[in-house]
Amino acid sequence: MSAHVIYGDSFLVAERLRQVKIEAGAADLMDSNRHVATASQARPDEVLAMCNSLPFLDTLRLVEIEGVLATQQASGRGPGSGRRTTGAGAAWAQLADAVPSLPDTTVLIFVDGEVQQNNPLLRSLSEHCSVHHEATPNAQALLQWIKGRAEDKSSSITPPAMQVLAELVGGDLWTIDRELEKLSLYAAGRSITDADVRAMVPYAQEANIFAAVDSIMDGQPGPALRSVMQLMEDGQEPLYIIAMIERQLRLIALARDLTDRGVSQPDLGRRMGTNSDFVVRKTLGQARRLTLPQIRNRYRRVLESDLAIKQGRLEPALSLQLLVADLATSQ
């Protein structure tokens, strides 16, 4: 019997899951011998019955269960508690106890997201299963991961390009992998540079918006106007730029409200709907410069500019330039 627990970052978990299946010889089983279920839709007794069934015309039976650890993660148990929960959590704990007695022909894999180390079911399963914790890399580890991922795609990437990509995208490995695929094709055999990243990664356009908004919030109409003019020269429509400024003001208002209510910085990205440390850091810096009334006044001015264009009272480019000058000089 082969039993594994794989949890952590969803991208790394998916990769480890494929590797474990291959190593266990369970990657190419018949459909009748492969079972995938979620803790929310399956009963522990049903899963146990699957595990105890012998394979049909195959050497192994694969049982993959998602989200079991989370049944006790959300139980509200305090750190250091050693007691098991009741209800669904306790039922899954009974399955963990049955792992040593499962047939040798069963490959059982528990798959989950990030959970606390004191999760009681994780501790129980650790006694009988191979545990693979796939944590999202950060800081220098993230840069090394980017470098290795580029090499896996038969490409290479310069250190400045790694830094820019990490800052723009953050720890979203799915997005980084997709962007590296695109950048590898774009570079066509040469090393991926920071210029390539800025040209090809959508988040780079957002960085240019940050430059414009930074100048606006700093009361610098000249740099702000130059930034938006550059965006238009790069092919961005005035209405799109106005929409991006409006979106950034909305994020600034949200960041300001969350920090005023004491939300910690690690939780801000999730509450703001972004995985990018760059976006969170820049938005927080902008939010600290303004009060909520000031943010509301600027937001109202953006809506007025958008309405003037849609009602045909002002040309889009002129309306945008007047808006930027007004925002950058308002108090």
Image: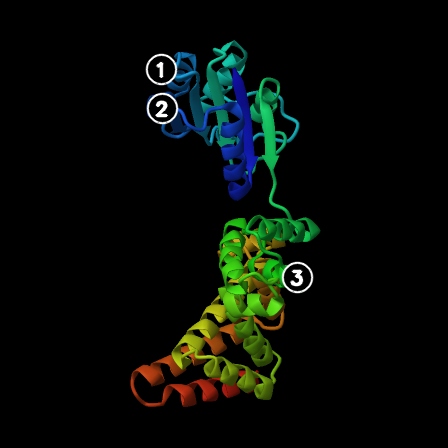
Q: Position of residue 82 (x, y in %)?
A: 62, 22
Residue at horizontal 53%, vertical 70%? 199
Q: Position of residue 197 (x, y in %)?
A: 56, 65
Query: Is there CB contact under 8 Å for labels 2 and 1?
Result: yes
Query: Is there CB contact under 8 Å for labels 2 and 3?
Result: no
Disc on the earlier residue, 3 or 1: 1
Q: Position of residue 321 (x, y in %)?
A: 47, 88
Residue 42 to residue 328: above or below: above
Residue 233 to residue 49: above or below: below
Identify the amino acid type marked 3.
Thr
Residue that mark 2 sits on = 30
Residue 274 to residue 54: above or below: below
Circle on res. 158: 3
Q: How far apart, in angstroms, are the residues tagged by discs 2 and 1?
A: 8 Å
Identify the amino acid type marked 2.
Met
Instruction: Answer few, some or many: residues within 10 Å of disc 1's Cα (few below 14, many 20 plus, some between 14 and 19).
Output: few
Circle on res. 57: 1
Is there any visible trace of residue 51 in the rendered image? yes
Question: In front here: 139 or 81?
Answer: 139
